[in-house]
Image (spheres, grey):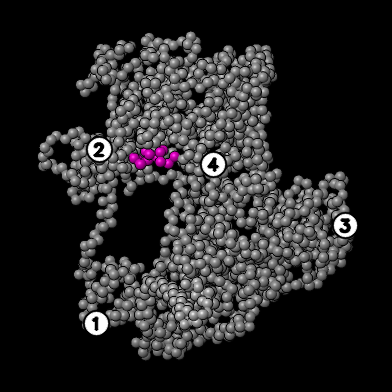
Amino acid sequence: MAPDKKWMQLIHNRLDDAYIHGVEIFLNYTFTRLREANEIRCPCVKCCNAVSRTREIVRSHLIVHGIIQNYTFWHHHGETIGETEEPDSESVNDDDKIGEDHEEDEIHDILTDLHPFYNVDNMNIGDDDVLEEEPNPEAKRFYSLLKDFDQPLYEGSKLSKLSTLVKLLHIKSIGRWSNNSFNMLLKMLKKDLLPDKSNLPDSYYEARKLIKSLGLSYDRIDACRNDCMLYWKNDKFVDSCKICGASRWKEDKHNGESKIKKGKKIPYKILRYFPLKTRLQRLFMSSKTSPLMRWHHENKANDGIMRHPVDSKAWKKFDELHQSFAMEPRNVRLGLASDGFQPFGCSRTPYSIWPVVLIPYNLPPWLCMKQENFILSMLIPGPGSPGDAIDVYLQPLIDELKELWETGVCTFDASIKRNFTLHAALLWTINDFPAYGNLSGWSTKGKLACPCCNRETFSKRLTNGKKQCYMGHRRFLPLNHKWRNDKKSFDGTAEWGLPPNTLSGEDTLDQVADLDGLPLTNDQKKKIKVSHDSRGDNWNKKSIFFDLPYWKTLLLRHNLDVMHIEKNICDNILGTILNIKGKTKDTLSSRLDLQELKIMKELHPKRNGEKYDLPTACFTLSPEEKHKFLSFLKYLKVPDGFSSNISHCINMKDHKISGLKSHDCHVLLQHLIPLAIRSMLCIEVREPLIELSLFFNLLGAKCLKLEELEQIEAQIPETLCKLEKVFIPAFFDVMEHLPIHLANEAIIGGPVQYRSMYPVERWLYFLKLFIRNRSCVEGSIAEGYIANEFTTLCSRYLHTMETKFNLLEQNYDGGALESDGGLMIFCQPGRALKGGKTQLLNLKELEQAHIYILKNCDEVQPFLEEFSQIPGDSSEKNSDRQFISWFKGKIEGLSKHDESKKMADLLTLSRGPMKYVTRFKGYIINGYRFHVQDYDKGLRTQNCGIVVAGETDEEGKIIDYYGDLTDILELQFIGGRRLVLFRCMWFDVYDNERGVKMDKYDFVSVNPQRFLKTDEPFVLANQASQVFYARDHSNKGWNVVRKFLPRDTFDDMQKNDNDFEDLHYSIDRKRKRTHPEKEIRHNSTSGGFVKESTVRGSVEKRTMVGNNKGLNSATYTQNVVAQKINVVPPGFDALEDETSFPNDDLEVMQETVTSKPAKENGQNIISACSVKGSNVVQRTSIGKNYCVPSSDKNELAQNKNLMQPGFDPIEVDSFFPRDDLEVMGRGNRFTSLSSVREGIEKRIMIENNKGLNSAIYDQNVIPQKTNVVCPDFDAIEVETSSPHDDYEVMQENMRSIPGKENRKNITSVGSARGSIFVQRTSIGKSKGYSVVSSDMNVPTSNKIIRQPNFNPIEHDTSFPHDDLEAMQEALRSKSDPMEDDLTLPQDEVEVMQDTQISKEGSCEVDRIKKVRGPNLCKVVTGLKPGEKLRVTFYHNRVVGDHHALFSRHLGSLVRDRNMCPLRVHSWTDIEEAKLEHMWGAVTEKFDSDDMIGHRDHVLKHMRRLWNNWRGSLHMNMKSKPLREVLKDVPEGVDKSDWEWLVKDHFLSAKFKEKSTRNAMNRSKLSMPHRTGSKPIREIIYELGGKHGNPPDMATIFFETRKKDNKLLEPETNQKYEEIQELLQVEPSLTNIEVVERCFGPQSKSHVVGFGGGITSKDLKGGSSAKAALLEQLNVSRKEKAVLLEELNASRKENESMKRRMDNIEKRCEIFESAIFRDPSSPPSSSEQNTG
C-alpha cells in the first residue's frame, strides 16, 4: 500500500514538519521497494527523474527544490498499478463537514432565538421518552421543531429535514414560485434524486404545516357588511349587526338561508388582524435585529442636521413630555400608513383592499423604510373603501397600542440575554390626501379642504368651473410686504389677514367634542350626516386615535404626503403650459370665471359668433416651444437609476405627455422642468416655477438643516403669490395650496422620506403579488404574507445562500478594503465593469498620475511640506520631478529602520506605478455607476459626467471641476497594491464668461467646447461624484449641469450645495491640484482648425524666402525679432510659429494695431498680453494682408498678442504670405503642422516652375519649416518650403485619381525606434518634392494642427528617387555593434520591421508586413491581487506554458524607469535595493516550486534583456547627427536619461571599445542558431527534458540550427556530422562530454548548444554542493532575521555599557585626584559637581 501523498501539496511550505515527514516516508518507501539500489531517480523539479542520486542528495533536493507536483504515481520508485493509497484519517471530507455543520448552525440559531427559554443542545426528546407533565403550547411547538431538526432528510444524510424545508421555502419566496411549481419540485426531488425513504414532504401544504410554528399567525375577525361593527369581544357570537341590522353571514340568493361550507357558516366580511405584540417581541428575540432596535439612541448626532425622525422636533417633544417612556431606549416608536389598492389590475370590477402597515422607527435610516421591516397590522376587506368607518376596523390595533403604552409586554432581548418590559407608541400617520380625511376625521373636500388651515382656509367657488380655488397666499407674507396692498396684480383686493394658527391636540378635541360616540357606518340609511356649514368646519368624526392617551400631545399627528402633492402639481403644470386637452386648467370655463371675477382682463374670452376666442396666455408654450420642450425631455440622457425612460411618455406628433408615474413627476418637478423652460416663457412665469422646483428639491433632501427649512418656509409664500399673478384661479386646486405647510411639517417631523408614501406604495404592489385565488384575495394575501414573514426571518440567519438581506445592490462598490496597517489610499472601494484591457502609459502620463497620487495621499503631506522648505527650482514641472526623486530617496532611507506596513506602502508608492495599466469601460464607486465617454455614447443613459471638489478659492468657496470621463485606469504597484484613477476632460471652470456660468438660482452651465489645458487629467476614483449634462436653451451650445445623490446612500456628514442638492464633499474626496496656477484656459472650437498637441520648448526659427506673384521681393529678416505679433486673417484659426518679418511691415502692423478699428475692412484689432503661466496666442485680421503668427510661451515681455473680438486665443505657429494663403485655402481650409523632428540631412532644392523662375532657395539650411496639407487628406508632417505654384500642382494632383503616367508614387521608409511608417505623396509634372519627417513616439515634441474630422497619419520621410534609394540602402546596412554579445531574441523586440517597396510608377499601396506591437503583458497585468502564474524552471530558466509570459514580464520590468534605472554604466552598478524591488515585481506575478532558489538566475536573465534593450537603443542612433539623436528620444525613456545615456555612455571610449570588440566577436560566428523567439531550453524541455529524458546532443544541434528542416552553412553541416560520428562510436557519452569533445572545454558562462545561463558544472551534475548551500540558505532565512535583531540589541547594549564604563572611569579619575591632591588646593569645578 502506497503512503499518503497529501504532503506533496505543501510544496510551497517545504520547511513545514508535515512536508519533511512526508519526504522521509517517501524515501523509506522507495528504498524498501528498490532494495538493491544505492541511488534512485531524483524527483525534484530540477532533476525531473532524469538523474540518479543518493538518498541524502535526493532528500536535500526535495527540500530545497521541491518535488514534481504532478508526479503522483511513483512508477520510478516502486509503486505498482492498482496499489491502493493509505487513507488519511485526520482529513476525510473535513471541508464538506465544516460546510454542513455551518448550515445546521444557522437553523440552530433560529431555534435558539425563537425559544430562548429552552436549551436546544441539552434537550433530546425521543419517541420513547415519557413526560411527567403535559407541556404547554409553546413547549409543544418547540419539541416539534426540535424533532424535525434532529430528523435527517434521509438515512445517512447530514442535512436535517427542517433545514432543507427552510431553504426550499426561502427559494420559493425569493423566486416567487407558485404552489404548483413547488409541488412539482418536491415530487421530482423525492422521486428522482433522494432515496426512497426520505422525509421530504410531498406538497407545499405539508411543508407549511411542518414549519408553521416558526412563523406567526393572524386572527380572523368577522365584520359587518356595511362596516358598522366587528364581531369580536362581547359581540363575538352575534349573528347580525347592532347598527344596521344586516346579517353577519352570506345568504343564498334563492332561499335566503345562510351559506355553509364544511359545516360552518360563511361570514360576509372578514378582517385579517396580525397581532402586534408578538411581532415586536420577535424583533428583540432575534439576535440579528435586537441590537439595531437601539440605533436611534446610540447613534444619533447633535449637529443640527436632521437625518432620521429621532432628530425631529416631534420626537424630542414627545420624549420631553413622556420621560418614563423615553428612559427605555428599546421602547418602539411606530408610524402608521394605509391606502387602498385594486387587486385585479385593469379589471372593470371595482374592488378595494385597505392594508394597514406599521413602520418601526427605532431602526437605522437604511433599514426602517425597507419592506422587510414593515409590519402588516390588518387587511381591511373590500369590495368598497371603508371611508370614515375605517375606525371600526382599527379597534383591535388601538386596543393593543393602548395596552403596549400602559402595561407593556415582557420581552426577551437576545442582544443582552435579559427580559424587559416593552412599550410602544404611535407617532403619526402617513396617507395620501383622501385617506388623510378618513383617518383624521377632517374632510379634505369642499371650501375648507385644507386640514392645516382648518376653519381659516381661504377659497373661492368658481361658478363656471364648478370647483373651489385656493388662493389668498398673501396672508402668509410679512405684514409690511408690498404685495399685500397690490390689488391689480391679484384678485383686486388688498390682503391684511394673518396666517392661520396651528391647532394643538387640545384644540382639536374641543372642536370634535360633540362628535364623540357618533356611529360610523356606510349604510346610507343609518349614516348620520354632519352639516359642515352649520358647524363652520369640515369635521366628520372624532378620530379613534384620540383614544390613545398620548395622541393629543403629539405635534404632528397626520402627515401631508409629498409624493402625491408633487405628482398633482407636476400634472397641473405640464397640462397647463402644454395646453393638453383634458389636463389643462386653462379652459373656456376658467376664462369665463376670470371675466366674472374681473381680473386678468387680457385673458378674457372674446366672443366670435357662437364661439369664443381665447387669447394666448403668457403661461402657454407656443408650438415651437412645445416641440423644443418635449424634444429636450425625449432626448435627454440621465444616469442609470435616476429615473425611468420618460421618453416613452412623450408624443412628439401631438405635443403631449402622458402616462407619468409618481416618481417620473418627482424627477420632472425637482430636476428637469427648470432646465427645460430656462429659455421659454416669460420671466414672470419661469421664475416661480423654478423656485417651486427648488423648494421641493431642498424639501426632499436626505439631510435637512433647520435654518434652510426656515428659509424655504419664508420663501414659499412669495413663490405661490408669484404663481397667482400669472396663472388663472382654476389652476389653484388644494394641491397647489398644500406646499405652504410642507416646510413646517418637515421642521416638526424631519426628513420627508420617512413620512412619504413611496415605500408604502411599493409595498402594496408587493402584497398584490401574493394573490393566488381571485375569489378570496384577502386570504391569499394573508397566507402569502405569513409565509413571507417566515422566510424573511430565516433569511436573516442564512449566510450560505443568497437572500434578500445579503443580495448586493445594483451599484454596490464592494465596500472599503480592510486596512492591514498600510496606506489608506490603497483601501478605497470600487468595482470594475465591462472587463479590463491592458494599456501602456507613456512617461508623461505616468509622471502625471504618480505626482497626483502623491499629492493626494494624506500620509505624504508631511513630506510635501518638508520638501517645500528646501530651496530649488520654483517651476512646477521641475519641482514635481525633484520631489519624486527626493521622496524616493527619503523613503528608502527611512525604510531601513522602519519595517512597518505603512512604511512598506510608502516605499512602494515612492517608486511609482508600473507602466502597464488595466483600462475599464465602467466602474462603480461611491454608489455611482460610471462609464467612459466612448462607451456611453451608444447607451440611452449618461454616466460619463463627473464632478470633483477642488480646493477652496480666495473667497473660501469650493471649486467644482466638471468634466467628462474618458478613461478608467487601474494602476498596479508592487506588493499587490492597486489604485484606480479617472482620466477626464475638464471643462474650463476658471473663465466665468466663456467657460462656466452660474445663474441666480445657482444652476451651473458649462461650455462643452472649452477645456482646461492642464497637466492634471487624473483624479482618484473615490474623489469623483456624478453629474449629468443637459442642453442649456438659455445659452446656445452650452450644457447645464445637474448634481444628484446616488440611491440608497446614507451619509452622516452630507452637505447641501448651492443648488439645493445634497452632495457630500469630505476632505479626502477633494481634488488637490498639483499645479493650480498652471491650469490654462484652452478653447477647442467646433470647425476650423483643431490643435492636437503642444510644441516642446522653443522651436528653431524658420524663414520662408520666395518670389511669388503679387508679393513684393522684401527680404525677411532672419534671426532677431525684438517684438512678435500674431496676426491671422478672419475665418482661419491661429497657428503657432516663431517668425521674423520685415521691419517696415512690423511698424505698419504696430501702427495699425494702436490705431482705431478700421471701418473699411470691418475688423477690430485688439491688443492683449498673455498672462504669465498661460500659453495664450491670439488671432486677428487686417484686411487681406498676409498673416505673421508668432508666439512665445514664457517671455512675456516679447509678446504682443492681437486678438479679433469674439475669437478665442489659441496657440499659433506658422507663417504664410498672402498669396500662398489664398491659393492654399481656396474655398477650403487647410491644415498646418509644425515642430517636427529636426536633424535630417540638409538639402538644396532648386526649382524652375511656371511663374517662379527666379526663386532660389538658400543652400544648406531651411530655417523656416511650414507644413501644409490639402483639405480631405490626412495631415502629414512636412519640413520644406515650396512656392505657391507647387502647392497648386500638389493640390490638383492629390484631388485627382492616381495611376496616370505622369505621376510618381514615392515611398520613403524610415525607422522610428523600431516602428516603420510609410507615407505616400503624389507629385505632378513639377519636379518639386516634399521632405517629410515624423516622430510618433515623442508627442510632446510635435505640434499637430489638423482639420476637424481628419486624423493625422504618421510618416517618416519622402525624398527624390535617388535620395530614397540611397537612404534605403543606408537603412539596410549593418548597425553598430550592440553592448552585449548576445543576439536580441524575437520575443523581446518591441516591433519587428519588414517593408516591401513598390516599383517606381506604381500606384499600388505599399504592403507592410503585419508586426506585433508593444508587449502589453495582458495576462500578467490582468492577474488579481494574490493570484500568481505557476512556472517551471529547467536548467535555471523558465520553460513550459508560461515561459513566454515570464520573459515578456521581465522585459517590461527592465524597460520600466520606475523599476530599473537606465542611468548606470552596467548592471553591476544597480543598487541591491533596486534589484530587490525588481525581484518583488517578479514574485508578485509568478511562483514556482523553488522561486527563491532561482533568484540569481532570474536576475541574470533580466540583465541580458536589459543589455539587449540598451544595445537596441544604441543601434537606432547610428549615422545620425548628435543633435538629432538627442532630440529623437525613444519611447519609454526620459529625456534626461536619454541625454546621459548618449553623451556619458554611448559616446564614452570604454563603451566604444567594448562595442567594437563585441562586433568582432559576432563576425566570427559561423554556425548561428535559428530558434527564433523560442529559447533553446524550451526545445530541449519539449523534446523529452520535462520527462527526465532529454535528447542527445546531435538532436539538440540540428533542431536549434535548422531552416526548412535542413542545415544551410557548410561549417554547421560539418560539425553536425562530427557529433553524429562521435555518438555512434561512443553512445554512452553525456551531452556535456560531446560538447567538450567537439567544441573544446566550456569554461564560459554558457555551454555551446544550450544557450546562456547553463554552465558545464550544471550539466556535469556537480551542483550538489550548491544544492546543499541553497538548502542551508533556505533553512537559515528565518534565523537570519532573528540574528539581526539580536545583533542590533547587542550593539545597543554594548554602546550603553561603553557609556557607563566611560562614566565610571571619569568618576574614578575625579575621586583619585580628590584623594591625592594637596589639601590646601581648592577642588576643581568637576569635583564640586560630583560632590
Q: Where is 1446 relative to 1710, above or below?
A: above
Please report contact status of discs 4 and 2: CB closer than 8 Å, yes or no: no
Q: In this picture, which residue range is highlighted in magenta?
A: 289-300
Disc 4: which residue: 1055
Between disc 3 and disc 4, whose residue precedes? 4
Pick whichever, 768 or 82, lies toward us.
768
Element assignment for label 1 = loop
Disc 1: which residue: 37
Residue 723, image x and y in percent?
A: 62, 25
Q: Residue at x 47, y 15 (%)?
A: 538
The quadrant the N terminus occupies is bottom left
Give the number of the disc on residue 1147: 3
Of the residues shown, which amino acid type is indicated by label 1? Ala
Q: Where is 1077 relative to 57, above or below?
A: above
Task: Report the Cα–Cα distance between label 1 and label 3.
Answer: 105 Å
Query: In front: mark 4 or mark 1?
Result: 4
Disc 2: which residue: 211
Between disc 1 and disc 3, whose residue precedes? 1
